[in-house]
Amino acid sequence: MAIEDNPQSRETYGLELRRRREAAGLTQEELSRRVVMSRTHIAHIEAGRRRPDVEDARRLDGVLDSGGFFERFLPSLKEGKVAEHFAEALELERRAKVIREYAPKLVPGVLQTAAYAREVLGSGFPAKTAEERDRLLATRLERSGILADFHAPVFWALLDEAVLRRPIGGPEAMCEQLRHIADLGESHRIRVHVLPFSAGFHALVEGFVSLMWFEDLPPVAYVEGLKTGRVLEVPSAVRDCQVAYDHALGDALSHRESLALIRSVAEEYEHAQQ
């Protein structure tokens, strides 16, 4: 059983954690040591600002002897809307004031067009039905809503050149996708930098990272691999990711040069259609 993930349900969940922690005679710091979580993370859960993942919830149940309450009633997004490992990152993305992403292979989800996203979500293993794909597609396209406000969040996209060259969905879909990114960049809604193949090895070559800053939370980093993803909140780990991003950004093309390259590759895809 799960309760719908909304601010009210997270607050209820947080209040129950606080009640059971205090009943056990534990401070947040003492509980954090026993469940191997940061005190800050526990404080955010109790305040209704964050949610634990399944493993965190199980450890809370074990330490507080709560009979599986925290796992059974773990707030979750509606089933099938996003991959489980991305659920927490999605919540944070919606609240972030600044987002800086590095994409090594695919266009970041927030920037994906319908045709591009449909191809990404409809491919891969295990195979999905048309209904499953369309449900995921609706959520993917909803994410672009965070760009509706021209000023927030501030969004930077650092794209490996492979993102531009990999023909996801064919020439027509790629032409539309790249022009969408260029339009956003030229309107100054987002900042775009491309890491060209000529840069060779760079600080982020190993994989995707999203850096997020907030008004009321410490900054976090989200890293992702095959079927896995993890939100990093330990300050030293977050700083390492921020420094790596800055180093990679130093190897990238300027915003203006990047937009010119994106437009050029879009034209190549347009000619391929003819």
Image: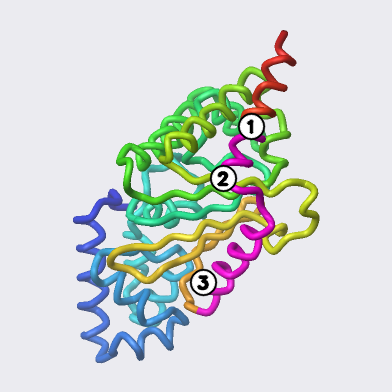
Q: Earlier in the sequence, mark 1 or mark 2?
A: 1
Q: CA distance from mark 1 to mark 2?
A: 38 Å
Dot 2 lies on which element? helix
Residue bearing the label numbered 1: 127
Number of the front mark, 3 or 1: 3
Dot 3 lies on which element? helix
Tell me where residue 48 sits by quadrant.
Answer: bottom left
- The residue at the point 72 percent across, 57 percent down is 205
Number of the front mark, 1 or 2: 2
- 3 and 1 marks in contact (CB < 8 Å): no
**Which x, y percent locates residue 136?**
47, 34
259 to the left or right of 132? right
The C terminus lies in which quarter of the figure? top right
Residue bearing the label numbered 3: 238
* 177 within the magenta span: no
Q: CA distance from mark 3 to mark 2?
A: 25 Å
Q: Main secondary structure of the magenta part?
A: helix
223 to the left or right of 144? right
42 to the left or right of 166? left
Write the start and end of the magenta stretch as one range: 236-261
**Which x, y percent locates residue 247?**
64, 65
**Which x, y percent locates residue 124?**
67, 35
Number of the front mark, 3 or 2: 2
- The residue at the point 61 percent across, 27 percent down is 119
Q: Earlier in the sequence, mark 3 or mark 1?
A: 1
- 3 and 2 marks in contact (CB < 8 Å): no
Instruction: Name the colour scheme.
Output: rainbow
Q: Are there few (<14), some (14-19), or many (20+) residues within 10 Å of tag 2? A: some
The type of residue carrying mark 3 is Val
Residue bearing the label numbered 2: 255
* 253 within the magenta span: yes
Q: CA distance from mark 3 to mark 1?
A: 35 Å
